[in-house]
Each structure stands twice: as C-alpha cells, then as structure tokens.
Amino acid sequence: MDAELEREFDRVVGAEQRIEPRDWMPDGYRKTLIRQIAQHAHSEIIGMQPEANWISRAPSLRRKAILLAKVQDEAGHGLYLYAATETLGADREDLTRKLVEGRQKYSSIFNYPTLNFADVGVIGWLVDGAAIVNQVPLCRTSYGPYARAMIRICKEESFHQRQGYELLMTMMRGTEAQRRMVQDAVDRWWWPSLMMFGPPDAESSNTAQSMAWRIKRHTNDELRQKFVDMTVPQADALGVTLPDPELRWNADRGHHDFGEIDWTEFWQVVGGNGPCSRQRIEHRRAAHDDGAWVREAAAAYAHRQTDREAI
Ligand code: ACO
C-alpha cells in the first residue's frame, strides 16, 4: 500500500502538481517542510524587531506610516506561515517554545543591529530584495499551502523592497552626511545579505533532498548569484559602492564574480552568537509572556462560544 501511495506522491510532484494537507506524504517530506516553514515564520516574526527599533524615531509621519505598515506585514507573513505548518500537524505553541529555547532557527540576517535610519532603507533594498529572490521560486514549491502563502508574501515583499530603494534614493539626493549614512549601512548589510541564502551548496545538508521533492526549486548558490547579478546595477543607479573589491563582471560566465563570504561568521550567527542574538530571543520571549493573557482570554471566549453552540 505504502509503495503505491509513494508512487502517487512521486507522480504528483513530478507533474508539477501540488501536494495538499490530506494527501499521503513521506515522513521526511513533512518534517522538512515543518522545519523550513517554521524557520521561515520565525524569521518573519523576529525580523520585525530590527526595523521596529526605528518606528518611534522615523524622520517624518510619512516614513513612520510606511514603516509601521511594513512591520505589520511581516507579522502577517509569520501568521500565514505558522498556519501552513499547522496544516502539516505542527502546533504553533510548540514551535514558539522551540524558537525561544533556541531549538529552532531563524534567519541569520536578523541578528545584526540597525544603527541609523538608512538601515531601514538598506533592509528594504538588500534584505527584502534577497528574500524576494529566495521566495519567488517558493511560489512553485510542491506543498500547496506553502506555495499559496508565498504568492501574497512575495507581493508584499516587493512593496517592501521598493520602499527601501525609494528611501535610499531620497537620502542619496540629500546631504553629504546622508549619503555617508547610506554607504555605511550598505557596508554593514551587504555580506550578511549574501549569507541569507544559506551555506554553499557543497555544505548544504538539505538541498539535494529538498530539490528532489521540489520543496526548493534552486540551490543556495544559484539564488545568491542571481541576487548579486540583480543588485550590482541597482547599486550603480543608487551611487553606492558594494564593499567587495573582487566584485566584477565575468563575461565568460555571464555573471558577476564576487569575494569569499566569511562562513565562520555565518555559522557563529546561525549558532546563536550573532551581535544581537540574545537580545532578539529575549525580546521574543518577553513579548510571548506578556501576551499570555490575550491567548488565555481568546481561548476562554472560544470555549464559551462552543458551549453555547452545544446548548
Ligand atoms: N540563517 C539561519 N540558518 C540558516 C540559514 C540562514 N541564513 N541558511 C541556512 N541555515 C540553516 C538551515 O536551516 C540548516 O539547518 P537545519 O538543518 O538545522 O535546519 C543549515 O543551515 C544548513 O542549510 P541548508 O541545508 O542549506 O538549509 P535549507 O535547505 O533549509 O536552505 C534556506 C536554507 C535557503 C534559508 C531555505 O530554508 C529557505 O529557502 N527557506 C525559506 C525562506 C526563509 O526562511 N527566509 C527567511 C528570511 S527572509 C525574511 O524573512 C524577510
């Protein structure tokens, strides 16, 4: 029976159709999806912190409204993604516990500090830009609820990317001090943005299997290269220098060559030792504890409604 179910699963995946929650799926497929989608959801929620740091200090009402909307969007992305894990049988409370206990990962990028307002623009341009390159292919991932969640998320991410670029364009048209702020932010965020795509393919433990199951549609290095090629002309148009002396066009490859990423730093950050790792988790834990009364009230209300319906 299992062999027949597995053949049907392979056929659906091979035919570029979607696996849905009630379909049979291999245990490893389910586990891999819960791992990746939970990590993705945690990233969206933790990712609210670095930018929320600037909401109360945004330089104008317009910038504040944009930033508020953007940070709220990230919360929404986290919720769609947690809902997608629930269709696989995961429990959201359990995932949050694993996050705050350091037993599940979230993206390395959110462990870096936001030191000036240009960081908000650079996060939009580079971090959300990298997220789009990584996530647009996930709209074609083989698991239906994840693929569908990604469609809306990518639309919102592309607004985030553009607001960041527009903010930076405005600053670059401003004073010399503002231009220096932008360059400083680019210098600090460039390499961590390249790390978002994950370890090199040769060290990526999950890629081969995730590609076979069509959960991932491209390898980490393929997407990183695409991001570099896309970003270089944008940096030129903006008038900033990307902090890599080895970055240059390679006509033979038809791609940009770029310097070696500091993988020691990457693994340090992934291991929970990034510049803001402790602060991010502490903040998340405190927010979760502070929200306990809301969850209890919502659960009590839901029970009362169920009891009423039963009468
Ligand atoms: N930050 C933290 N951990 C990472 C990162 C990163 N940037 N990249 C890879 N890792 C972890 C992986 O989770 C994996 O650990 P695990 O096996 O213990 O779970 C390990 O490093 C080895 O990496 P891979 O085998 O390459 O892992 P995977 O196949 O899952 O690829 C990737 C990593 C590309 C991030 C993939 O999971 C993915 O596409 N996820 C969806 C997108 C996402 O999560 N984006 C979050 C940031 S974007 C945003 O929120 C705005």
Image (cartoon, rainbow, N blue to C red):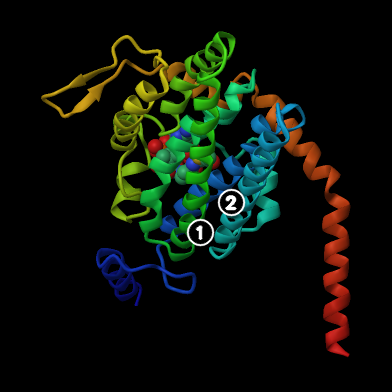
Name the residue that disc number 2 marks.
77
Disc number for residue 122:
none
How packed mark 1 is, by other alpha carbons closer than 10 Å (few <14, some 14-19, many 20 or more), is some
The kind of residue tagged 1 is Ala
User: Foreground: 223 or 6?
Assistant: 223
Q: Position of residue 297 (x, y in %)?
A: 88, 61
Q: Residue at x 56, y 37 (%)?
A: 105
Respond yes or no on whether mark 2 lies under 8 Å from ligand 1: yes
Disc 2 residue crowd, few under 14, some 14–19, many 20+, Cα 10 Å: many
| Residue at (31% x, 40% y) in the render | 219
Q: Is residue 37 left or right of residue 280?
A: left
Residue 92, percent from left and from top: 66, 55
Please report whichever mark, 2 or 1, sits nearer to the chain's N-terminal start.
Answer: 2
Q: Which residue is mark 1?
A: 149
Q: Nearer the viewer, residue 229 or 18?
A: 229
Label 1: which secondary element: helix
Residue 198 percent across, percent down from the top left: 41, 33
- Is any part of residue 134 visible from this angle? yes
Determine contact: label 2, label 1, CB under 8 Å: yes
User: Secondary structure beneath disc 2?
Assistant: helix
Locate the C terminus by quadrant. Answer: bottom right
Is residue 195 positioned above or below 90 on the image?
Answer: above
